[in-house]
Amino acid sequence: MTGFSAFLTEKEVEAMSKLDWFLQAYPSRAYRLHTTRTPTFLGLRRGKQGVWRSSNMGEGVIIGLLDSGITPGHPSFDDYGMPPPPAKWKGRCDLNASFCNNKLIGARSFRRSNVTVVDADGHGTHTASTAAGAFVKRANIYGLARGLASGMAPRAHLAIYKVCLESCASDDILAGMDAAVGDGVDVLSISLGGDPVPFFVDAIALGGFNAISKGIFVSCSAGNSGPDHYTVSNDAPWLLTVGASTVDRSFRATVKLGDGQELDGESMYQPSNYKSKLLPLVYPGLITGNSDTALYVRGKIVLCDRGTNMRVEKGQVVKKAGGAGMILVNDALNSYSTNADLHVLPASHLPYSDAAKIKVYINSTSAPTAAIIFKGTALRVPNSPALASFSSRGPSQITPGILKPDILGPGVNVLAAWNTQKFNMISGTSMSCPHLSGISALIKHAHPDWSPAAIKSAILTTARQKDNRQQPIVDEKHVPADLFAVGAGHVDPQRAIDPGLVYDLAPGDYIPYLCGLGIKDESVSAIVRKNVKCSSVKSITEGELNYPSITVTLPAIGSKWISYTRTVTNVGKPMTEYSAAVDVAKGVTARVRPAKLYFKEVNQKQSFTISFRRNGDGFGPAEGRLRWVSKEHVVRSPISIFME
């Protein structure tokens, strides 16, 4: 024997290094299929213990996707090795017969103009391949992000419902959702939304309730209106509301200033024949009077502030004026949240913290210069995942007593299939939503008898709150993100497939909640699609809904206990004991009764009460967490507290 591998701590390696026979030791490297990153980042390919193995990559599960259509014939929708759809499938495929296969089993258009289901935008193709795209070798964008592309559930079937062109009409959306339910899909993926409106006039909330009533899981994007609070959409508690995060990959475009400073940014435009060199650097923000802007920027690298127009559009303006390159710096609002865009000229997108450095340098010399150095793809970027600045935040305007968004998933610089070229990289909660749609399909395959609420609970109570450096997930300002930004945290598929306990809800359990919101009988009836008289229903508050997260408001006067009862179902092993651990902010006291739960059987239910009261003079938002801990599982619920 000339060597061995072992799991060792640094101290053990140090001790071993003092032994006579020791020669050298080094950390194991992950040699991988050269992936488009998110399946590996999410742990789907983790050897024998990977989620793909335990879920057979979602085989037999049907994902219905409402979007801008599909690009037939794309290799991401090849059906090599795919079984036929399950017998329950009742849908149809309105494409040329050669494009319909065991992967792409359904394709219909619900636009009133009855246009083709073919995708003219690219958005639907991108989201469909993210959720359930087949394996495609040598995927890349102009040589970057090269690797093996696939969706989250590569053996799941896809049914496409085109409901969008330039915009998406609510009636088309509702028709598409109802058709998908009738066709027999298992998961609905909806990467679209609007301004928050009451559930009874929200097509997605209405269609979503019908879907979950038939056992169909519904995953929706949270919206791209961050970083402001009160912007989250698709916030009904029966929907999974998905925010966007970064992954541990960057497309490095470094700016080197004439004084030697090097500042790392991002760009997807990295031509292989580009020769980096120092060029004059100018900032048009310093122009006064009637200067000729084109003459001012010609042949130079131009510093641009991020504003309201599109990032790529800024580069187009610079190029049209004769500029040789662009440095795009963030405003304070977006801070550290950068994007790798496909610019039209050499460019780098830098965080706000670098803007002042560059401007100070420009003002320090009569002849400032800069160069853009392309460094390709960087992996294992620290502080990943991080919250995307554009990801919409809570509290919900419609139901502030339910914590939204629910969860984060990868939504920045996501590579997936496209309509006009094989692959494209774009960002948005539209990208994070299909990641969760595909992951829910994996869970559905592993646990076909679980309800939509049980699947959601599994995702939320196993989410992680720390990044790849074991630090709290940060927002665009690199400070710990609050619960209204991250919800339960970042999805962890490996844990979600085996959560231990779930907070389950039947469709009828939402009726007392809806009545408790003060909604009229006819509006509640419209949502649940049956006659409801709230006067004969024992209504509940938002906090009393058996939701996996907890939101509580503590009144300013008095120290009265506010109590909520929750019920958990054992989906782990029989003969298991869980102990409660609750952590809350200073100024609040919390207790759990009983403090231990013992489950003799699988699917056994147990209830507990969690109570809160003030113990100080604090006010405003605060946070906490409840954990049920066994030998094998930690079931975590975030607690959002508001002290009046």
Image: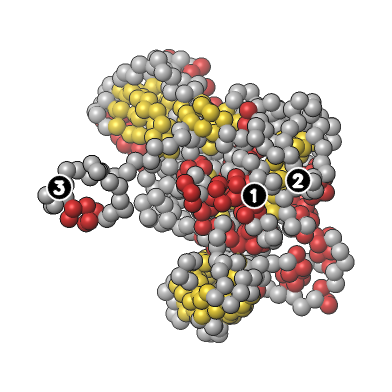
Disc 1 to disc 3, how far (Cα)? 51 Å
Dot 1, how many residues are within 10 Å of its Cα: few (below 14), some (14-19), or many (20+)? many
Left or right, residue 358 beside residue 49: left
Q: Secondary structure at mark 1?
A: helix
User: Between disc 1 and disc 3, whose residue precedes?
Assistant: 3
Proximity of marks 2 and 1: CB atoms separated by less than 8 Å: no
Of 47 and 166, the residue lying toward us: 47
- Mark 2 vs mark 1, CA separation in Å: 14 Å
Give the residue pinned by disc 3. 21
Earlier sequence position, callout 2 versus callout 3: 3
Q: Position of residue 451 (x, y in %)?
A: 69, 61
Residue at point 15%, 47% (across, down): 21
Residue underneath mark 2 = 86
Identified by mark 3, the residue type is Trp
Q: Secondary structure at mark 3?
A: loop
Question: Which three-letter amino acid code belongs to the residue tagged 2?
Answer: Pro
In the rendered image, residue 71, in percent from the top left (x then y), is placed at: 69, 28
Crowd tier of the residue under label 2, counting other residues whose Cα lies within 10 Å: few below 14, some 14–19, many 20 or above: few
Residue 189 vertical position relative to residue 548 in the rendered view, above or below: above
Residue of label 1: 441
Give yes or no for contact between labels 2 and 3 (Cβ–Cβ under 8 Å): no
Q: Quadrant of residue 404?
A: bottom right
- Give coordinates of residue 489: x percent, y percent: 51, 57
What amino acid type should be assigned to the residue bearing mark 1?
Ala
Name the quadrant of the C terminus.
bottom right
| Label 1 with label 3: CB-CB less than 8 Å | no
Residue 95 in the image, given as x and y percentages of width and height: 79, 29
User: What is the secondary structure assignment of the residue under circle 2?
Assistant: loop
At x 58%, y 34%, the residue is 135
For residue 251, what is the image quadrant?
A: top left
The residue at 63%/28% (across/down) is 75
